[in-house]
Amino acid sequence: MKKMISLSLMLLVLSFASAGWGKDIKAAFVYVGPVGDGGWTYAHDQGRQAMETLPFVKKTTYIESVPDGAEATRVIMGLASRGYNLIFTTSFGFMDPTLEVAKRFKDVAFEHCSGYKTSENMGNYFGRYYQGKYLSGIIAGAMTKSNIIGYVGAYPIPEVIRGINAFTLGVHEVNPKATVKVVWTQTWFNPGLEREAADSLLDVGADVLSMHQDTPATLQAAEARGAFAIGNDSDMRQYAPKAFLTAPIWDWGVLYKQLATQVHDGTWKAESIWWGMETGIVKLAPISDKVPQKIKDLVAEKQKALMEHKMKVFTGPLKGQDGKVLLAEGKTFNDKELLSMNFFIEGVQGTIPE
């Protein structure tokens, strides 16, 4: 009987081991910018540090300022070869390199941020950041006096376009007369170029700036010219305390801890994750005291409705830049349409480059 019990216990342990239960985690992160950018990469690295608090996460590492293409493939390959069993690649341009390496290392769990491709051991993840953009747009629309709001955009990919449109919907929630002027930089991280773009918008009368960039350069431009600004990715008020109104921000630790736990437990599977504000992955930084209380209350009301799934940001009637109807009364975009968004809505001034 004792031998049978011992054999049963041994088989149970082996079955847990084969399923991945109790696996120690060695996690690696590939960043498109430096951890000190104050925005996108900084927020991801805060998430990495939060994940380190889990007792079964034995080691984490990161490689910063990795360019797209062959260099990204080389970096990801190197991490997988060194025994990291959970690898996060945190930029849209890393999607194909991640997929290529994942095919060669089937025993490694790969997670790619903001992309759309998956494989048996590669998932993708993102948050509904456009919800935060919409809420911040309400604040921008209330604070502009010139009715010209500038927006510094990085690349014309669906993620950024979706954010600009959501922001504009927020602006028009309180100020239908305001326009959102867009200037592209074609870079995620270039403080000098971002500053030039911001200044060009201030030069044409913008008195509130927003952005989808990885550094606080846009906020600093606004501060220098006495304008207001909305931050991006993290709470950037320290860089422009007089200009800062709020910012949509990320809390990646919420997701990173869950994914690490799943790999540890053997329950992880490759899937597409797109969480909303109700999960805590997307938040709004504390709103400046310069913003009227009635606007703060409106933002809180709309945020509550979003988190309780009582409203959706993109709900008709909605027109495009050309005046054509995109959504009829009461209709909404589905996730596939949101994830492939490649047009501007009414109220946005600017073009989407090829």
Image: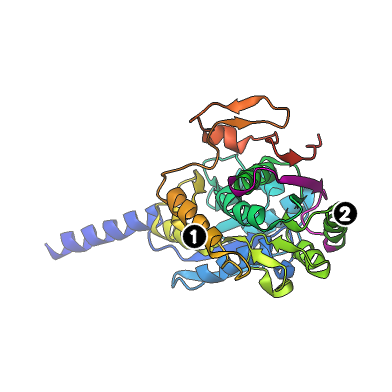
Q: In this view, does 183 lie above or below 219?
A: above
The answer to which image quadrant residue 20 occupies is bottom left
Q: Label 1 belongs to which residue?
A: 297
Magenta part of the protein: which range? 173-191
The numbered disc on residue 200 is 2
| Count of all numbered marks drawn on residues in the image | 2
* Crowd class of label 2 (few under 14; some 14 to 19; many from 20; radius 10 Å): some
**1 with respect to 112 (left or right):** left
Q: Give amino acid for label 2.
A: Ser
The numbered dot on residue 106 is none
In this view of the protein, which residue sits in the foreground, 202 or 211? Answer: 202
Residue 231: give x, y in percent of width and height: 68, 62
**Quadrant of the frame with the N terminus:** bottom left
Could you say whether the residue bearing mark 1 is in a helix, strand or loop?
helix
* Disc 1 residue crowd, few under 14, some 14–19, many 20+, Cα 10 Å: few
Determine the residue positioned at 61% across, 65% down. 291
Q: Which residue is drawn at 52% across and 60% down?
A: 294
What residue sits 74% from the left and 50% below the top? Answer: 147
Q: What residue type is labelled 1?
A: Asp
Question: Viewed as shown, does residue 332 lie left or right of 309?
Answer: right
Nearer the observer, 196 or 258 = 196
Image quadrant in which the C terminus is located: top right
Disc 1 + disc 2, Cβ < 8 Å: no
Q: In this view, does 50 lie above or below 40?
A: below
